[in-house]
Image: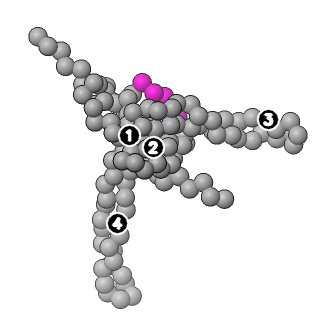
């Protein structure tokens, strides 16, 4: 009997790599305040980002017309042996493009992988 390792099968689907950053507190000795810094926790982790759209129509009461609203959902898949905290920044390179995301909550852990919903990370300001 041949035992199939589902984790190895899933690894073949990972077409991207990601770096995972976490915010950590430190004490600023000059100002005597607690500040945060962004530190890398994991590098070059195989992953796959998936996108899907939700479309809904809303009736405009003023004009009596329907307006379509399209929202994009972003999800990352990766091995379940990596502990990713809520609020981490995840930098993904996939299909020749690098994008920074923030995770919007706790990972959903399965026996062979984990899934995390992502939002685009806007570090302006």
Read off the residue under disc 4: 70
Q: Tell me whether the residue at label 1 lies in contact with that at label 4, contact meaning CB atoms closer than 8 angstroms.
A: no
Q: Residue at x 34, y 66 (%)?
A: 70
The earlier-in-sequence mark between 2 and 1 is 1
Residue found at the very far left of the displayed protein: 1
**Position of the C terminus by quadrant:** bottom right
Residue at x-position 38% and y-position 37%: 47
Dividing the picture into quadrants, the one containing residue 112 is top left
User: Along the polypeptide, which appears first: circle 1 or circle 3?
Assistant: 1
Q: In the picture provided, is 31 more to the left or to the right than 94?
A: right
Distance, label 3 to label 4, CA atoms, is: 43 Å
Label 3: few (<14), some (14–19) or many (≥20) C-alpha neighbours in 10 Å: few
Q: Position of residue 86 (x, y in %)?
A: 52, 39
| Contact? badges 3 and 2 (CB < 8 Å) | no
The segment highlighted magenta reads 81-86
Residue 67 placement, left or right of 83: left
Q: Earlier in the sequence, mark 3 or mark 4?
A: 3
The answer to whether mark 2 and mark 1 are in CB contact below 8 A is yes
The front one of 43 and 49 is 43
Return the disc, 4 or 2, that comes first in the chain's sequence: 4
- For label 1, the residue is 16
Question: Label 3, on which residue?
Answer: 27
Nearer to us in this view, 42 or 59: 42
- Measured Cα–Cα span from mark 1 to mark 3: 36 Å
Q: Could you classify mark 2 by the number of other residues whose Cα lies within 10 Å: few (under 14), some (14-19), or many (20 or more)? A: many
Residue position marked by numbered label 2 in the rendering: 92
As for residue 83 lying within the magenta part, the answer is: yes
**Whole-number angstrom distance, CA of label 4 to CA of label 2:** 23 Å
């Amino acid at each position: 009997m041949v035992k199939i390792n589902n984790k190895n099968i899933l690894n073949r689907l990972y077409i991207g790599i990601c770096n995972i950053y976490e915010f950590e507190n430190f004490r600023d000795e000059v100002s005597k305040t607690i500040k945060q810094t962004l530190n890398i926790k994991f590098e070059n982790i195989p992953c796959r980002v998936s996108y899907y759209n939700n479309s809904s129509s809303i009736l405009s009461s003023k004009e009596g017309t329907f307006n379509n609203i399209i929202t994009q959902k972003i999800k990352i898949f990766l091995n379940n042996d990596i502990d990713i905290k809520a609020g981490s920044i995840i930098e993904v390179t996939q299909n020749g493009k690098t994008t920074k995301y923030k995770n919007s909550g706790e990972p959903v852990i399965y026996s062979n992988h984990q899934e995390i919903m992502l939002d685009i990370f806007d570090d302006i300001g």
